[in-house]
Every structure is written in structure tokens, then in C-alpha cells.
Amino acid sequence: MSHSITVLGAGSWGTALAILAAKNGCRVLLWGYHEAHMASLAKDRKNERYLPGQLFPVGLDVTSDLKLAAEFSEIILVSVPSHAFKSTLTQVKPFVAESALQIAWATKGFNPEDGSLLHQVVADVLYPEVPAAILSGPTFAREVTDNLPTAITIASQQEQFAYRLANIFHNDRFRAYTSSDVIGVEVGGAVKNVLAIAAGIADGLGFGANTRAALITRGLAEITRLGIKLGGKQETFIGLAGLGDLVLTCTDNQSRNRRFGLALGQGKEKSSILKEIGQEVEGISAAKDTYLIAKRHNIEMPITEQTYKVLYEGLNPLTAVENLLSRDQKAES
């Protein structure tokens, strides 16, 4: 394979995607902003902090030089937390030309400044017509690097770019499906983190599988309502980037968002939970963003609303569940 790709963001998911692409025969340059961390990656040939024990394959190099990273390949994949997405694009723009740029992102969330979707940030900060794509779906970084069967969605309005990315990442253990529904994939990836916190809270309170199944199912209804209102397609929300990602993050403790909710439900303090997890918990900011977007568009999202109130208004988690159960009776759909 003659492809090359730059990955911006040396957390667990960015590192996993860089390893995957290199194993598939790509030339890969992985960038991270922290010089000392990237120096240790270069020396040890592994990211011990985020993916301990996973050695880097031949073809994967690392750097903390953003200019070098931006100029390495015309394909740039951004895998930073959503709050750093816009600033990362702003910093990279001076080093890229519109005619030689294809941008993708594996970031899940909204732009916290105004609640906009990330493809809108790309168009505003970089260039409106640049080939752009999002990678999303039910994925844990460790399972990808352990070569366990995985499937994702790559969504782009430029079909050829979606196929090009699929060729970079697809192999006999990693299946990449393509889609044109960028908005639907973005909404699914952002809101599922909020619902994973809710599912974790319910489990932390000691509720059972019935409760978890109900939260997942009604949570999917919330994602679908919001996603369609914002321009997504209904079929996306019952696919990998919707239902698939939602089930994954709500049911497995590899999910940081679920673990965060679980600890909240058990009565632990927010600050101590975050210190223990030691990585970004995207659902916290996504809860606020989603709640405000839903209010703006008059979309009913009761699970999201109660999760927001737990996180930002100090609502007792048990009271939040009682609020959901005491809502007026209604038809399911």
C-alpha cells in the first residue's frame, strides 16, 4: 500500500488508528502536542500511558512538530478531544494548502463554543470544499490493537475520499463501511457518550439489566429525534455509528463515560472520579452541549436532560431516575 497519513492526537484512539494504518502498510506520522510524551513514544516505540504494551509497527513515526506533521501527508486524521478540535485545526491551517488537503476526524462531540457539528468547524476554520470525513462506530482502542474483529463507519460527502480512507484502515479484522450521512454519524457519536453516563449511573445505583435496556432503547430514540432534526438520516441511527456505538459504550466498562457514570451512581465525587480515570470523559461536555441544542430546537430528550442536571445542577442521581419514571404515560412512538 502506497498511502501515507498524518494522525493528530496521541491518545488511545489516535494511537490505535495510527498503529492500524501502519500494520496495513501505510506510512504514518503520529503527532502529539506534549514534547516529553512524544519523546518517550519515539524512544520506547509504544504509548505506555494510553495503550500499554502495544509496540509500534514499522512505518509508524512520531513527532511533536505540528508543521512537520501537517506537511507529511495530504491526508490528515484528527483524533483530539472535541474541546481541542477547533484550536488544533486553527494551528494546522498555516501549514496546509487547500489544493493538497484531505481532512478526517475520529473526534466525537460538538464544538463547545456554539454547539456546532465538527464538519461545520472544518468548513469554517479550513476550507468549505475540502474533502472531509468522519470515522465513528463501536470501537475500543485496545480491542483494535489486539486485532479483535471490529467494524466502523466512514462518512463523507466525497465518496472517493471515503473509499480511500476505508482502504487505509480496512483489513480482515477491521471492516470499514462507508456512508454519506456525515451529520447522522456525528450526532450518534456525540450523544451516545451522554447516554453512557446515564447507563453507568443507573448501574451504579444498583438497578438491573431491565433498566439498562430501557435506557439504551429510549436513548436511541433521543439520538434519532435530535439527529433527524439536525439533518441526519434515520437509517444511520440503527447502524454502527448509532445503535452500535450506543450499545458498546452503555454496556462495557472499557467505556470511560460508563465508568464515570457508574462511580457517580455509587456516590463518588466528580473530581476524584476524573482523577482516577485519567483521560477525557467526553460525555460531560457533550451533556451540556446536547441539552442546549435540544432546548434550542425544542427536541424532547428527557434522559439527556436529567443527566445534564446531575452533572451541572447537582441533582441527586436517584432523583434523576425517579423524575424519568414519573413522567406522564404516553405512546412509545
Image (cartoon, helix red, strand yellow):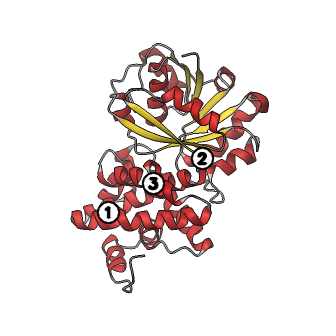
Foreground of the two, 67 or 330: 330
Q: Disc 3 vs disc 2: which is toward the camera? A: 2
Q: Residue at x 38, y 68 (%)?
A: 218
**Callout 1 touching callout 2 (CB < 8 Å):** no
Residue at numbered disc 2: 180
Marks 1 and 3 close (CB-CB < 8 Å)? no
> In the rendering, at what x and y percent does residue 46 appear?
41, 21
Q: Quadrant of residue 148?
A: top left
Residue 232 at x, y percent in the picture: 58, 58
SS for tag 1?
A: helix
Residue under numbered circle 1: 201
Eye-nearest disc, 1 or 3: 3
Mark 2 element type? loop
In the image, what residue type sits under mark 1?
Ile
In the image, which is nearer the foreground, mark 1 or mark 2? 2
Tell me the CA gap for discs 3 and 2.
14 Å
Q: What residue is pinned by disc 3? A: 242
Can the viewer see residue 99?
Answer: yes
Dividing the picture into quadrants, the one containing residue 35 is top right
> Real-space Cα distance between discs 1 and 2?
34 Å
Q: Which numbered dot is residue 32?
A: none
Residue 272 appearing in the image: no
Identify the residue shown where x is 40% and y is 45%. 138
